[in-house]
Image (cartoon, rainbow, N blue to C red):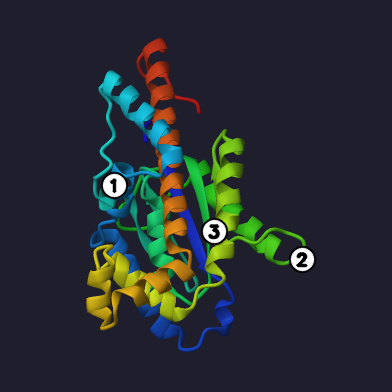
Amino acid sequence: MKNNIYVAVIADIRDSKKLHERSVFQKKLESVLNEVNGQINFSSISKFVDNPPLFYKEHLESIRHEEKENGSGFDYDHNSTNDIASDFMITLGDEFQGLLTSGFHLVQIIDYIERSLFPIKLRFGVGIGEIHTEIKRNTPFGMDGPAYHIARDMISQLKAAERKTLEPSANIKIGIQDNDWLSLLINTNFMLLSAIKKSWTESQVHTMNVFMKEGVQKQQNTANVLGINQPSVNKALTASNFYTYQYALNVISLALCDIGNEFAMRADKKDSTQPQGAEFDV
């Protein structure tokens, strides 16, 4: 994203005081975050772009056509580590955060962290907006701006909702600077995805993790790694609504890619009409 627009992620652990062997969990969390920072290739989104569901295909084709005409085609296969402006790191005993330059891999990163730490329950507050300070890749401290303020507010809203009996349930909430309507639509999807995740078992999540990683998203490969037959893999993925869940994540990714393009186009338009050195005001 251009002109200081970033994606801030702040996360914490629900009921962290009830954790047994906190030091063991913290080492596991550090290991997962290190993987996100430099070792994981989130390729499911590029596969989705190549073979989208029918209801999204026409929209996606129009985006690519427009990008081709503008000469600004987005690289859907680019590695997620290129999106990381500031590494995901633990900031407090039960809190961690990271900063991204794009929202394209945001939900894949969140999904990977959640599944890797399952059944531990996490909250994620996401803010898309400006950063007004210097970006520091190797430390989460000393950075500030609306993106972080929004992310922190999202965490507070999630905690407040947990204390109310009639509030919709979710563990991820996003706020997009100057775009409350898209924020509402995406957050509604997060609520529905939370309902899917509530039914997951540890066995199902283990199958998902192997399928997405060692199994390279192929059921037979996954069965070979797990030492079971392919129908058992299919049964676990189907029972957990995993394919529906993944498609929903990928549609959210494309929506966030769209908002990134919108910020960029607004910046370019503003730059073309303002004297050099003028600030971009979202």
The answer to whether any part of residue 34 appears in the image is: no
Disc 3 secondary structure class: helix
How many discs mark residues in the rendered view? 3
Whichever of callouts 1 and 2 sits on the residue coming sooner in the sequence is 1
| Left or right for 97, reference 175 | left
Asked if residue 270 can be seen in this view, the reply is: yes
Residue 183 sits in which quadrant?
top right
Label 2, on which residue? Answer: 165
Report which residue position mark 1 lands on: 46
Q: Which residue is farthest front? A: 231
Mark 2 vs mark 3, CA separation in Å: 19 Å
Of the residues shown, which amino acid type is indicated by label 3? Leu
Question: Disc 2 residue type?
Answer: Thr
State the image coordinates of residue 206 (x, y, percent, origin top left).
37, 77
How packed is label 2: few (under 14 Cα within 10 Å), some, or many (20 or more)? few
- Say whether residue 188 is left or right of residue 233: right
Residue tagged 3: 193
- SS under mark 1: helix
Residue at the image point whose x is 29% and y is 34% from the top: 74
Taking the spot 37% from the left edge, 19% from the top edge, the residue there is 277
Spot occupied by residue 122 in the image (x, y as percentages of width and height): 52, 68
What is the C-alpha distance between the residues marked 1 and 3?
21 Å
Residue at the far bottom in the pictured view: 21
Query: In the rendered structure, which disc, 1 or 3, sits on the residue that comes first in sequence?
Result: 1
Task: Give, as a three-letter code, the residue at label 1.
Answer: Ser
Mark 2 element type: loop
| Label placed on residue 135 | none
